Amino acid sequence: MFKGIGLVPNWQKKHVSSVIAEVKKFFESYRVPVYIVPSRDPLLHMASPIKDMEEWSEKVDLVIAVGGDGTFLRVAREVAFMGLPILGLNLGYKGFLAGIEVGTLETCLHKLIAGDYSVDDRLMLQTTVLRDNQCVFSSHSLNDVIISRGPFSRIIKLDTFINNDFLERYPGDGLIIASPTGSTGYSLSAGGPVVNPSLQVLLITPICPHLLYQRSVIVNREDLVSVIVTTSSADIFLTLDGQEGFALNYKDLIKVKRAPCLTRVITFAELNFYKTLHNKLLEA
């Protein structure tokens, strides 16, 4: 039996209060305490860490993210170093990460109590920015790292290296470095491949490249991806999981590698990756 359950709702979602009440009532019937990030905190706009979650590593066995993929991504970054598995409950549009829907909630909760589930470890990305050989930014993400031009900028150029080997100077709108989990996000929209999230690789996908070819490059999880900003007259931004941003300067060095932490994702047999891929994307 669980010692506790953590609930992180996106309180801006429709019907979220009734869903939270249902989840709380279910676990309390088994005498499992439920800890909820309160409605006064707008989840996606808070500075990290979320104070209500600081003691969860001692109090809970798993976290349920209630909202959509944005909520799931935020929770993943908050609990990555706690080792807590996450179950995503989708109240949004696609919900590729937040795998279960409200209609299957009761069934899935019973499966949790029965131990009828699996926990998949997902690779995360560690990103650092060096400016004049000094670290000016560092963070981790689950889905992707995006280097992109501002709304009024022209083509930007990004020199990209794998370890110490030069790969390409990408001219265009930017570059996406994605984890396998993030392969179904922005990288997919930019023409990148779909990768099973159990694989341990990194994807490099150019955004609207001004080249005669547009191909993603898949590298080993131990490889270091380095990108140097070689455009001086443009607004260029670094974005992690679409939620954390940093303004880049000319000659900034961005380094992306496998993070020392993982995201642990709760899955059910009937909701595996290939079935989710079919339901969420191929029939969209």
Image (tube, rainbow, N blue to C red):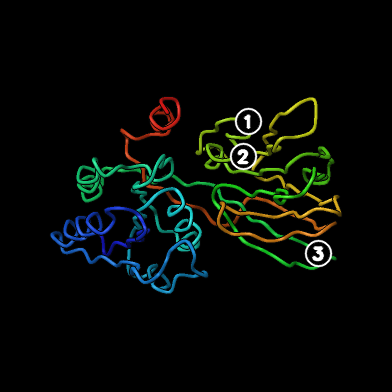
Q: Nearer the viewer, mark 2 or mark 1?
A: 1
Tell me, for residue 201, which label it has, or none.
2
Which quadrant, please, contains the C terminus? top left
Secondary structure of residue under mark 1? loop
Q: Which residue is mark 3?
A: 131
- Does 167 appear above or below 88? above
Residue 84 quadrant:
bottom left
Image coords of residue 123 (percent x, y): 55, 47
Check the image and report above or below for 159 versus 3: above
- For badge 3, the amino acid type reads Arg
Task: Report how far apart the C-alphas of labels 2 and 1 lie in the structure.
Answer: 17 Å
Identity of the residue drawn at 48% across and 58% down:
74
Q: Can you tell which mark lies on residue 24? A: none
Query: From mark 3 to mark 2, how far is it between C-alphas?
Result: 27 Å
Instruction: Report the residue that reaches farthest toward the left.
Output: 29
Residue 157, how many percent across, how many down? 82, 44
Q: Mark 2 or 1 closer to N-term?
A: 1
| Distance of label 3 from label 1 (alpha carbons) | 31 Å
| Residue assigned mark 1 | 191
Q: Amino acid at mark 1?
A: Gly
* Left or right of 9, for residue 209: right
Disc 1 crowd rating (10 Å Cα; few below 14, some 14-19, many 20+) is: some
Numbered-mark total:
3
